[in-house]
Structures are given as structure tokens and as C-alpha cells.
Amino acid sequence: MDNLIERFEADCRLRHLKAVDTYLVYVRDFARLQSDLAHPSRDALKAYLEVLRGRQMKYSSIVRAFASLSAFYEFLVAEGEIESNPIRPFRSRYIRAYKEDAMQDRRQLISVEDATKIVSSTLKTRDRAIIVLLLKTGMRQGELRALDVGDVDLEKGEVRLKPTAKRSNRLLFLDQESIRVLGAWLQARKHQRLNGCTALFPSLQARRLSNPQLIYIVSQAAERVRLHDPNSNCLEKRFTPHCCRHWFTTHLLRAGMKREHVAWLRGDHDGSAIMTYYHIDPEDVRRSYLACIPQLGI
């Protein structure tokens, strides 16, 4: 059993897979419950799903767990250890059904006033800049974590994201509030010992922020002003970085911004034929964004 996991880890690292540590957490967790890791029964997979549910894990975490197991069994197929990946049919049948149940709650949407409370209660310069940037740009968690100092141009009021499979547009704009807050952080950042770390938002260990660290920063700030309940499983009572993206999208639309401009800023892929030929002028989006983005009074 341990030999299979060690071989899987070596293969993942050889392929430079970024999620290898996540894969290993869930594969080892599952392995502790199995007598024959290479050939789990459907009942064993059902039992593991119930274990994860019993831990009150979010749907996204359960999806991540079975994606990790699927990567492991795909490796075993490639190595000739097994004939087929048992996770694929199981995930198709059971995880989707669970999603319908798990996603009944709506994600929390806060007001502009509540967003101001979250930012105002955040005293650390780095954390305040993180929250403002998430609210004002709608970027994804991974996109923010991947930012380097050189990706920000305060003079132009622009942020250029790293390329990813999910994002079509990489250019985002900054309003004056964002520029002030980011400028303050960049000045403070110069006085920190970062050991060559180029991340825009390094951790206290001078490394790039991890996803759990980013979630903690945002949720803790919301908890201080009673907008996040860490003990609740209801999405409407929790505030995470993705809620900032929800806030960004909703309030821009409510302010009258064109849907195609909002979609462009979000980096949403549109596979329709007409959008292939419809070219959006970034300067039009910039003007619209600056006119519509809510002001927090910070």
C-alpha cells in the first residue's frame, strides 16, 4: 500500500503537478480505511463519502477529495496495476447527486456598507490590500495568490494576472481606493525580510500564501464584524474569498455595467460563435468599471 502511494508521489513530482500535496492528503486518508487500496469496492467508496459528509466538509472539498483519488487510480491504470479507474463512474453517479443537495444554500451577498465594515476592521496593511483587491477586481483565489509585485502597475491602475485555463482576459483595472491601499502595502512590503520571495502577498514565512491562509484572512475579517459564522454549514452565513467575486459581479451589474463588460473583467470563457467576432475595447471597459465600481469610503 505504502509503495503504491510513494510511487504515485514520485510520478506527480516528476510531472510537476501543483496539487500533489493535496492529492497525497486524501489518498492517505482513504488508504487508512482500506484493506486493499488498489481495488476498492463501491461500498468502500460509499463509506468514504459518508465519512467526508460526517466531517461536515463543504461540497467543494468533497469534490477535491474524489478528484485526488481519481488522479491516484489514473496513475495505477497507467502503471498497469489495475484495468480501470473506479472513481470515474462513482463520482458521476454520487457526487453530482450530492451537489444538488449541497448547493441549495445561496452564497452570501453583502452590501457595500458591510464591505466597508470588513475593510475598516482590518488593520494589517497586507490583509487590507488583499481584501480590497478581491472586492474591487473579482479575481479568483488562485489568481491573487499567484500575483507577483511586477504584475501590478499603480501608475496605469492595472493588474495583469498569470495565464490560466479558466481565464480568458488577464487585464484588470484599479480605482483610486485600490491604488491607495495597494500603494500603502507595497511601501510596507519593502521593509520585510522576504528572502527573495516575489509574491505580491507573501506569508509570514516569506512564501507565497496558501489557499487556507487566504481563506483564513478573509473569513477572520468578516467574522470580526459578524458577517461570517465559522461553525455554520450554511453558505449564507459564511464569508470566503469567493464571496468577494460574487459581490464584485452583482454590484457592477446593479450599477448598470454591461453584462459583457462584467464577463470580460471576470475572465469568463464564452464559446458562442458571435463572441468570437465581438471585440471588446479594454478602454471602454476601464471607463465603465471606474464609473460603476462601488466606493467603500476608505
Image (cartoon, rainbow, N blue to C red):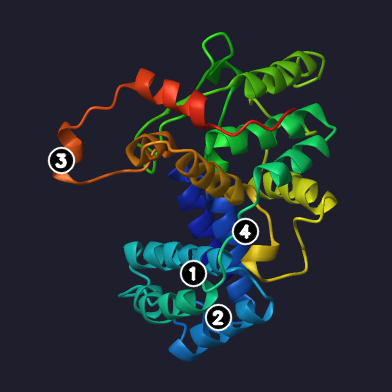
Q: Nearer the viewer, mark 3 or mark 1?
A: 3
In the image, taking residue 106 as reference, residue 77 lies left or right, namely left
| Circle 3: residue type | Ile
The circle drawn on residue 274 is 3
Instruction: Give the mark nearer the N terminus: 3 vs 1.
Output: 1
The circle drawn on residue 66 is 1
Residue 38 shows in the view: no
Q: CA distance from mark 3 to mark 2?
A: 42 Å
Instruction: Name the quarter where the N terminus is drawn.
Output: bottom right
| Circle 4: residue type | Gln
Instruction: Give the mark nearer the N terminus: 2 vs 1.
Output: 2
Check whether the beta carbons of the residues at disc 2 and disc 1 lie within 8 A of each other. yes
> Dot 2 corresponds to which residue?
49
In this rendered view, identify the residue nearer to me: 165 or 168: 168
| Circle 2: residue type | Leu
Q: Is residue 251 above or below residue 75?
A: above
In this rendered view, identify the residue nearer to me: 164 or 197: 164
Q: Residue at x 74, y 51 (%)?
A: 219
Q: Residue at x 34, y 78 (%)?
A: 89
Badge count = 4
Q: CA distance from mark 3 to mark 4?
A: 33 Å
| Circle 1: residue type | Phe
**Residue 284: where, in percent of width, then height?**
36, 22
Q: CA distance from mark 4 to mark 2?
A: 26 Å
Q: CA distance from mark 4 to mark 1?
A: 26 Å
**Residue 31: where, in percent of width, then height?**
59, 75
Q: Tell me where residue 3 sits by quadrant.
A: bottom right
